[in-house]
Image: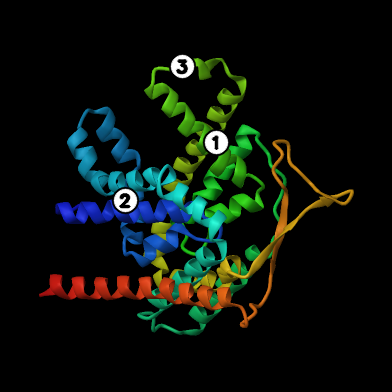
Amino acid sequence: MARQRTIIDKFFLFIKGLSMGAANKVPGVSGGTVSFVLGFYEEMIYSFQKINYKAFLLLINGRFKSFYTYTNATFLLLVFGGSMFSYFSVSLVLDYLLQQYELYVWSSFFGMILGSIYYISKDFNDWRTRNIVSLAIGIALGVAISLMNPAKENDNLWFVFVCGIIGVSGMTLPGLSGSFILILLGNYVLLLVDSVAMLYKTFAEIFTGDFSFMNSEERIRYLKIIASFTGGSAFGLVFTSHILGYVLKRWHQIVTAVIIGFITGSLGIVWPWKKVVYKFENGKILLDARGNEVVENFKRYFPDFSQQETWMAIFYIIVGLGIILLIDLYGTKRKDFIDE
């Protein structure tokens, strides 16, 4: 799996990692879908499979170069370096855009996911009964998850560890949004907003030589939470990748059919025209322990075509779709060039 990469290849891998990391933070958008569409999904899965007992032996025996080559470390470092960097850069921009231009952002994502369905299914021609059934199961699962109601926040470290395992599934399972799953588990704000903000603040203080945060119980609490979440995510990435690698080898067509169905069924999550439904208590919006409004679900509705913003949203859907089609065109031309 490991191979020589040019500087251009490495640059684009980092950009792909940025895209995947940003997608993972946005509820309803799957980082796995991004990796699938951008053409590095299977290499990512098989690279994680290389983090195994043999890799451990190479490491403890000091054979670092062999360990680096065996685990395809260049690929992993570039992709996940980009993903981590996006949490403090691209993700912050996305947070701002979602606050200021929510409808247009969701419209772009909707178009991109429509494009990804086309991208994944265009070369899939094996429509035997078992694959049609798998497609239907994927659609049913996607719809079921999109209709679930969020739970309450829970900062128990073991539960946070489990959230890491489940939340990172968005990287390894195209169509499944890890961020949306965290919303359903009640811990999206805690893990991907508050804890990330505290970690960023801590790094900034350490950089300036300020270690006063070590005396803050609240800061230590958040650092423990982000450490548990990171540990769960790392474990989940390796564990699920080993399972998926095995499944992809044995039942590649069935898995692809499930993925196509799941992404299609999950479209309701990123439907642009929706309103947040808050939980009410005594006629007032219910707040959590930190004063954040508690979301119960999303109410989806059909757009009013007499409004200009509706047509702008449709334009952004077309833009999102066009981005994926351009990526597909680029990938096809690049493949043809390599084949020549």
Q: What element carries label 1?
A: helix
Give amino acid for label 3. Phe
Is label 1 or label 2 in front? 1
Q: In the rendered image, which residue does mark 3 sit on? A: 211
* Front position in the image: 323 or 3: 323
- Residue 169 at least partly seen: no
Q: Where is residue 186 in the image (x, y as percent from the top left)?
A: 67, 47
Residue at (42, 28) in percent of width and height: 204
Q: Is mark 3 on a helix, strand or loop?
A: loop
- Residue 41 at least partly seen: yes
Give amino acid for label 1. Ser
Give amino acid for label 2. Ser
Is label 3 or label 2 in front? 3
- Tell me the CA gap for discs 3 and 2: 37 Å
Q: In the rendered image, which residue does mark 1 sit on? A: 195
- Tell me the CA gap for discs 1 and 2: 28 Å
Against 109, is 230 above or below? above
Q: In the rendered image, which residue does mark 2 sit on? A: 47
Against 153, is 305 above or below? below
**Along the polypeptide, which appears first: circle 1 or circle 3?**
1
